[in-house]
Amino acid sequence: MKVIVTKDYDGLSKEAFKVMKAVLDEKPNAVLGLATGSSPEGLYAEMVKDHEENGTSYKDVVTYNLDEYVGIDRNDPQSYYTFMNDHLFKHVDINPDNTHVPYGSTAEDAKKYDDEVKGVDIQLLGIGRNGHIGFNEPGTPFDERTHIVELTESTRDANKRFFDDDITKVPEKAISQGIGTVMDAKKILLIANGASKADAVKAMIEGPVTTECPASVLQNHPDCVVIVDAEAASKLSK
Ligand code: GLP
């Protein structure tokens, strides 16, 4: 695991962009594993800016997203599908047919998506306050594939800010790539910012590899870069 600590969120987004850009430069038809949430917003803004200013093309890029809520429409303002279109896809020259966000509510839907996710060159991840990656909550087996998840109270509480601060509006389930699916990526880039992530970041980097902190599995990945801002790094001992 390579760990980079930046002064602030802006620095984090720029460092993350460098990692992403290196993959795109080497392979214009790269397969990107993408994530939603507040953490990657700055990185996506950097990617859009680079596309507009330097012409970096996404026309041959293929993307697979990590997760999506169950029970909300694809075009709902809070869906992850909408998030990806708003923050990245509609601002670059990507072919919409090459973008994939999981959708569905059954084990069959999950299996079908898992079969599609192939050859990811770089998987972008955020981290939940309880150490979750994607929507793989604590206790999820490390070899699990894409599956339907019952969201924990803590995750629904953290995400209620997107739902008028009303936890009853936050979906109770999601469809998520499993940790086994995530770990198949050739390279992993995890980003985390803010004091609310400090405990999870410490457990991920310095704690034991345990399903109690799903992100700790990344210690076993052969090519994982973690970029955190000073606040998220504040509990690291080294
Ligand atoms: C969400 C998402 C994750 C995300 C994490 C952190 O629930 N399912 O993919 O990485 O929690 O979100 P944020 O970046 O908004 O803090």
Image (cartoon, grey):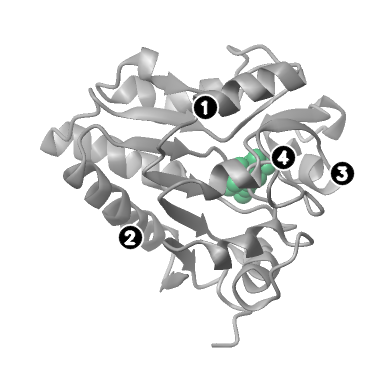
**Distance between the alpha carbons at the discs numbered 1 and 2:** 22 Å
**Distance between the alpha carbons at the discs numbered 4 and 2:** 26 Å
Circle 1 — which element?
helix
Q: Is mark 4 within 8 Å of ligand 1?
A: yes
Mark 1 packing: few (<14 Cα in 10 Å), some, or many (20+)?
Answer: some
Amino acid type, residue under disc 1 in the picture: Phe
Circle 3 sits on which residue? Answer: 153
In the rendered structure, the answer to whether residue 221 lies left or right of residue 60 reads: right
Circle 2 — which element?
helix
**Distance between the alpha carbons at the discs numbered 4 and 3:** 10 Å
Circle 2 sits on which residue? Answer: 15
Question: Which label sits in the foreground, 4 or 3?
Answer: 3
Q: Quadrant of residue 167?
A: top right
Circle 1 sits on which residue? Answer: 83
Circles 4 and 3, Cβ within 8 Å, touching? The answer is no
Q: Quadrant of the C terminus?
A: bottom right
Question: Which label sits in the foreground, 4 or 2?
Answer: 2
Which sits in the foreground, 115 or 5?
115
Looking at the image, can residue 208 be seen? yes
Mark carried by residue 159: 4
